[in-house]
Amino acid sequence: MAFSEFRPLDDKSLIEYIKAVPALSSILGNNVSDLSVKEVGDGNLNFVFILLNSSGSLVIKQALPYVRCIGESWPMTKERAYFESMALKEESRLCPEHVPQVYHFDRTMSLIAMRYIEPPHIILRKGLIAGIEYPLLAEHMADFMAKTLFFTSLLFRTTADHKRDVGEYCGNVELCRLTEQVVFSDPYKVSEYNRWTSPHLDSDAEAVREDNLLKLEVAELKSKFCERAQALIHGDLHTGSVMVTPESTQVIDPEFAFYGPIGFDIGAFLGNLILAFFSQDGHADQANDRKAYKEWILKTIEDTWDLFHQKFTALWDEHRDGAGEAYLPAIYNNPEVQLLVQKKYMTDLFHDSLGFGAAKMIRRIVGVVHVADFESITDADKRANCERRALNLAKMLLKERRKFEGIAEIVSAIREF
Ligand code: ADP
Ligand code: SR1
Ligand code: MG
């Protein structure tokens, strides 16, 4: 171990740390003389350093015992780095094409060293704000979600293996409780952390707090989030957790990982694409009205669900006679019953995804920590108009999600708002 007790690293102490860890210094050619160190953490919670020299590169991510974007007034366990390293390793085992490799983990230092996802990769959210199309995004994200979610579910695993891992990830309780608070509770009550574009959305925020039907639905989703250990989920799969080029898609930042409802991941990704869609009018200018780009986002939403459905059910069919104990072959052994259970499972998952996606959209508009898609619209009138349309769609989805039978209907609904 490099350092015997926890200390927050800076550019200088980081170099001392690297020198003391042979597994890391060897990646950099055992030479720190020409090493450049840059802190790039534009995420919400942690510190991220990029280390580069003529021999190699790596990323060091360190968790400090508080929420970075709020400050030390919001303490948060640094043990989150342990769960992030575990989840990164598991996800990269299941889907190496779309997850960076972990080189080293130091629990004392709450520190992960991983592969540097080099330029021209950028954070997807930034690409969406800039109006860049990613033709393989839906295919890649569907692949990531299908593999990581199927292979950690009871469709593939025994209940004994599943319970062991559920138990392990129950330790990530503080991060789960953060989500419980900011997604499922705070937007529906007065909270010191809530924020919205004011005064424009004052009555919209109040309407969320007064909406009994919305409260009924969000309670159901909260209970599912807390009680349903369906698979190992990423737990924070928004467009800021994905790095992209037109050819490559890399998923980072699974520190909220735990055994939870599969729809929470799918909903996070789709919900954030929907936020990106509604923000486009705020980014339109004379050079680009963003109309074609909005169509590309809608197609990506539709393709992501369709491809996920296709890939997930193909894995299910392929492993139907395997060790998975959810639907024992001895019972579900004829095509008719197989079709019935698959249809029910996927329909329920679709509705869960819509509900969780909607809840995550609502929190980004009237709760704590907003998204750059809207925040980067400087004209407050324009921003509020975009946000209101997204909020109204999300409220409708949350309340009426069970009426929708397919993703094409969602795309039509988005167009109507
Ligand atoms: P947080 O947990 O604080 O949200 P993230 O994991 O999202 O932190 O990382 C913050 C930023 O650091 C990302 O937006 C990205 O720009 C950069 N980053 C993180 N991991 C990598 C990586 N492996 N390669 C390149 N850049 C990275
Ligand atoms: C205080 S809330 C911070 C947010 O940032 C993370 O990315 C999660 O989405 C969390 O809800
Ligand atoms: Mg992040």
Image (cartoon, grey):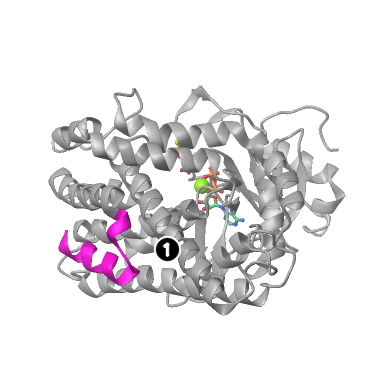
Residue 90 occupies quadrant: bottom right
Dot 1, how many residues are within 10 Å of its Cα: few (below 14), some (14-19), or many (20+)? some
| Image quadrant occupied by the C terminus | bottom left
Is 66 situated above or below 80? above
**Residue in the picture at 36% in, 67% down:** 301
| Image quadrant occupied by the N terminus | top right
The residue tagged 1 is 347
- Lateral position of residue 99 relative to residue 198, left or right: right
Percent of width and height locating residue 124: 44, 61
Question: Given the image, on which type of amino acid does mark 1 rest?
Answer: Thr
**Residue in the picture at 47% in, 37% down:** 179
- Lateral position of residue 322 relative to residue 183, left or right: right
Q: Reply yes or no: does residue 97 show up in magenta.
A: no
Residue 132 visible in the snapshot: no
Is 234 situated above or below 328? above
Residue bounds of the magenta highlight: 401-417
**Residue in the picture at 36% in, 63% down:** 128
**Residue in the picture at 38% in, 57% down:** 351
Percent of width and height locating residue 8: 66, 31
